[in-house]
Structures are given as structure tokens and as C-alpha cells.
Image (cartoon, grey):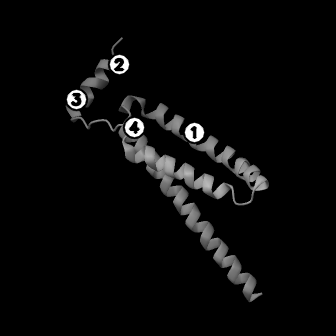
Amino acid sequence: MTRDLRLLAASLFCWGIGEGGFRVAHSLMNAGVEQRVHPSELGLSYGLAETVFGVAIVIGAPLAGLLYRAHPAAPFPIALGLIALALGLTVSGRFGIREPSSPAALQASLSEESRP
């Protein structure tokens, strides 16, 4: 029983680390969205980002299962490659960050958009 309890504790610890990484990635995604879009498009951008994030979660597990069935070691290098691709796109500046604007300029741009 003691061995089982230690194994359970170790498993829960590893799961917690993974869950923490998921939450960090999700928070960083939301922060990145906020920096890259105009404030008037923030709701749409958050919705699109959450949709892509959710679809990736739903599709990723079955794809990993199929890869595992084909070759048990296959999901790991492919996951590392996808992580490297995501980091490369993030670090490369491919998705530019908008320049911060003064409150007056922000108010002026919002009022221009609300005019018919």
C-alpha cells in the first residue's frame, strides 16, 4: 500500500506540473492577444484565440493516440517539433506588437470607429 501511495503522489505531482504549464500558456496567450489587436477588436480576438486553443486540445489527444499506436515513441519528437515551431514564431516577431498609444489617441480612434 505504501508503494501505491507514493506512486499516486508522484503521479499527482507530475499532473500538477502539467496543469500549471497549461495555465501559464493560457495566460500568456491571452496577454499576447491583448498586445496585438486594437482594443475595439479584443472580444473577437479572444474568442478566436480560445477557439483555436480549444480545437487544438480536442484534436491533439486523438492524434497523439494514433501516433502512439503507429509507433510508441512518435508523439514525443513531433510534440517537441511543434513546441519549437510555436516558440520560433513567437520569438521571431512574426506577429507584431502594436505600439502603445496615449489615452487621448485611444479615445480619438474609438470615437472615429463609432461614427456612422
Q: Measure the C-alpha gap from mark 4 to mark 2.
A: 27 Å
Question: In terms of secondary structure, where does tag 1 sit?
Answer: helix
Query: Label 1 sits on what residue type?
Result: Val
Query: Label 4 sits on what residue type?
Result: Phe
Q: Earlier in the sequence, mark 3 or mark 1?
A: 1
Instruction: Return the residue at label 1.
Output: 52
Q: Which mark is residue 105?
A: 3
Q: Position of residue 81 (x, y in %)?
A: 56, 51
Q: Nearer the viewer, mark 4 or mark 2?
A: 4
* Of residues 90 and 21, the one drawn nearer to the viewer in this rendering: 90
Image-quadrant location for residue 52: top right
Circles 3 and 1, Cβ within 8 Å, touching? The answer is: no
Quadrant where the C terminus is found in the figure: top left
Question: In terms of secondary structure, where does tag 2 sit?
Answer: helix
Residue drawn at 61 percent across, 56 percent down? 77
Question: In terms of secondary structure, where does tag 4 sit?
Answer: loop
Residue drawn at 73 percent across, 48 percent down? 62
Instruction: Return the residue at label 4.
Output: 95
Q: Do we see residue 29 in this rendering?
A: yes
Residue drawn at 48 percent across, 31 percent down? 44
Query: Label 2 sits on what residue type?
Result: Ser
